[in-house]
Image: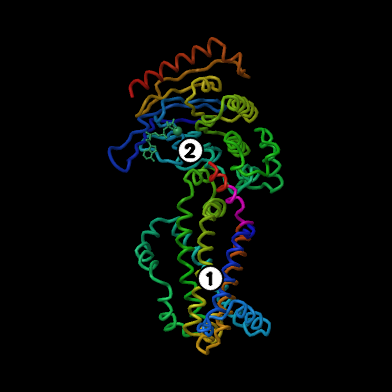
């Protein structure tokens, strides 16, 4: 359903040679899948998501959603930014931030939107904080607001850019499982960028490994672990450990090249 | 609203006492420098008998008209210039040239075109007030985080929704800063233009009393002007504190970090 074909992106810095962030990236994501992308830092993961979300024009190559080329932000696709704290509206309460996800939807009354927003605030574990402002919340809580705001809209495709990167281990575990539950109940397609190999394997049906800049997909790993996954037993499964080792070696080789 | 700090009030009262003592001691200056108590008594009198009120009303009417017009025009223009870089590039040299010019220099031109009536005074007030509002609004729009604009894009906001829901609130703290700076400027321009040519208003009254050697009345009106400026500022801060509570909270948090 989502297809990335020979995507290339060059940046012209203020001084010096152009930077080729994406060399030639190609992959597919099937409807309803949970797919992760891992790669060394600076290899162009955020750039890739921005191109897919129609926020940045690729230098060459195409992004196809349902066979149609993406030229601007497509309907039914939401990007969750790496800088989630900057993506929240400081002048809106948690409730109004989450409601923002519904506001330009036709045919929904204010009360209906608020009820939906409350439901999702509840689902991400922020009940009781509806009237708080984003800057009154911790980083993990802010991230939950951003997630609720995206999910309340029932996007068909959700692009997540290192959403749990700056969270402590316990919050991370909690949010990983909450995300999986929501993903299963919403039947959305998720493309998840992370630098955490274990997280990628734990969450995904499939993991794409990107090379160092100029990046391309160097390997596609199917993760055939049962769902629902479990933080203890899944992570102890030999197949989990095998996938982790394999990806770790691939990325180590890439880092060594840099 | 923040309350007046006790120490600050003490310094203020101290100055008043100093004024009183100095004025009483030097008989030579008595004519030009009446004691504080005499000035305040005169103020009470001219407020009580209504002499001052018509002038205050005239000045405040000009102030309100000029300030409101400037706010509307400059915020509107600033939003357009901030959002659209080619437009700004077009106007930048003009803005950079006019901005540092002292605004009272426009009074003679305004007199040529608009005569000596209210239109002239309002026009120079609008001109002078517009600069801080315009420049702050442009800056406010530009300093909105690109992540926020991209968020608006990924949620597929239409241009006018982007404007109402992201650009305007995002730039509002800076717009408010501009509005606050212009508050004092408006009062300055109203008073100055009234001093140059007018037959009512506080500026006129102050200069007129000075020329007719009613020095106590002159000082009393100056005190009234200071109090009005203070009151307007407090009113502004009260509205600001209510409307921009989120920004106060946000910046307070950043101070701690
Ligand atoms: N606006 C830009 N101008 C110039 N170069 C840019 C720009 N944006 C990104 N780059 C370059 O493109 C490369 C990829 O950046 P990107 O943010 O996509 O990396 P990333 O894989 O998301 O990294 P991280 O894991 O640290 O988030 C970087 O080397 C960066 O220097
Ligand atoms: Mg990134």
Position of B190 with respect to A12 (left or right) is right
Q: Is residue A166 magenta?
A: no
Q: Nearer the viewer, residue A184 or B178?
A: B178
Give the numbered dot on residue B69.
1
Foreground label between 1 and 2:
1
Position of B207 with respect to A183 (left or right) is left
Q: Could you tell me which secondary element the residue under label 1 belongs to?
A: helix
- Quadrant housing the N terminus of chain B: bottom right
Residue B147 position, x and y percent, is: 49, 43
In the picture of the structure, the residue carrying the numbered disc 2 is: A53
Q: Quadrant of residue A120?
A: top right
Residue A2 sits above or below residue B117 on the image: above
Q: Residue at x 68, y 82 (%)?
A: B48
Q: Nearer the viewer, residue A140 or B2?
A: B2
Residue A147 position, x and y percent, is: 59, 35
Few, some or many residues within 10 Å of mark 1 (<14, 14–19, 20+): some
Q: Residue at x 55, y 28 (%)?
A: A31
Residue B132 sits above or below residue B162 on the image: below
- Residue B37 shows in this picture: yes
Considering every residue shown, the one lying at the far left of the view is A16
- Residue A153 shows in this picture: no
Question: What chain letter is assigned to the residue under label 1?
Answer: B
Residue A231 position, x and y percent, is: 60, 18
Q: Distance of mark 1 from mark 2, alpha carbons?
A: 42 Å
Residue A17 position, x and y percent, is: 28, 37
Q: Quadrant of ligand 2?
A: top left
> Number of callouts in the render?
2
- The boundaries of the magenta stretch are B241-249
Q: Evaluate if marks 1 and 2 touch, with contact meaning CB atoms under 8 Å apart.
A: no
Few, some or many residues within 10 Å of mark 2 (<14, 14–19, 20+): many
């Amino acid at each position: 359903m989502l297809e990335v074909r020979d995507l290339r992106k060059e940046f012209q810095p203020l001084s010096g040679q152009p930077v080729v962030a994406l060399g030639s990236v190609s992959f597919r994501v099937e409807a309803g899948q949970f797919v992760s992308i891992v790669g060394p830092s600076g290899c162009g993961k955020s750039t890739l998501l921005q191109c897919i979300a129609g926020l940045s024009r690729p230098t060459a190559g195409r992004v196809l959603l349902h066979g149609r080329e993406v030229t601007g932000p497509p309907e039914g696709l939401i990007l969750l930014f790496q800088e989630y704290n900057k993506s929240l509206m400081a002048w809106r309460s948690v409730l109004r931030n989450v409601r923002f996800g519904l506001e330009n939807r036709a045919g929904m009354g204010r009360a209906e939107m608020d009820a939906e927003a409350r439901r999702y605030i509840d689902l991400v574990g922020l009940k009781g904080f509806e009237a708080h402002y984003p800057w009154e919340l911790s980083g993990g809580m802010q991230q939950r607001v951003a997630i609720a705001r995206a999910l309340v809209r029932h996007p068909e495709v959700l692009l997540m850019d290192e959403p749990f990167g700056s969270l402590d281990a316990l919050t991370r575990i909690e949010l990983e499982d909450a995300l999986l539950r929501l993903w299963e109940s919403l039947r959305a397609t998720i493309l998840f960028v992370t630098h955490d190999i274990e997280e990628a394997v734990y969450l995904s049906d499939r993991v794409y490994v990107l090379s160092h800049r100029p990046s391309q997909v160097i390997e596609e790993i199917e993760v055939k672990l049962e769902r629902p996954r479990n933080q203890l037993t899944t992570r102890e499964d030999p197949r989990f450990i095998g996938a982790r080792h394999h990806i770790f070696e691939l990325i180590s080789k890439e880092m060594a090249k840099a | 609203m923040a309350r007046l700090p006790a120490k600050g009030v003490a310094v203020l009262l101290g100055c008043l006492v100093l004024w009183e003592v100095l004025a009483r001691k030097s008989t030579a200056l008595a004519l030009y420098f009446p004691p504080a108590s005499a000035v305040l008594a005169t103020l009470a009198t001219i407020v009580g008998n209504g002499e001052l009120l018509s002038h205050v009303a005239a000045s405040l009417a000009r102030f309100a008209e000029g300030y409101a017009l400037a706010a509307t025009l400059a915020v509107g223009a600033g939003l357009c210039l901030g959002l659209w870089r080619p437009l700004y590039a077009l106007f930048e040299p003009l803005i950079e040239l006019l901005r540092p010019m002292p605004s009272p220099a426009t009074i003679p031109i305004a007199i040529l075109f608009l005569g000596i009536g209210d239109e002239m005074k309002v026009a120079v007030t609008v001109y002078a007030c517009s600069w801080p509002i315009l420049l702050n609004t442009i800056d406010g729009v530009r300093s909105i985080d690109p992540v926020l604009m991209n968020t608006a894009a990924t949620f597929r906001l239409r241009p006018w929704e982007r404007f109402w829901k992201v650009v305007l609130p995002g730039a509002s703290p800076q717009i408010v800063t501009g509005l606050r700076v212009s508050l004092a400027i408006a009062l300055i321009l109203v008073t100055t233009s009234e001093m140059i040519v007018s037959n009512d208003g506080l500026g006129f009254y102050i200069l007129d009393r000075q020329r007719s050697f009613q020095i106590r009345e002159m000082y009393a009106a100056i005190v009234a002007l200071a109090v009005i400026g203070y009151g307007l500022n407090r009113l502004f801060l009260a509205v600001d504190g209510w409307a921009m509570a989120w920004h106060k909270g946000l910046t307070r948090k950043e101070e701690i970090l």
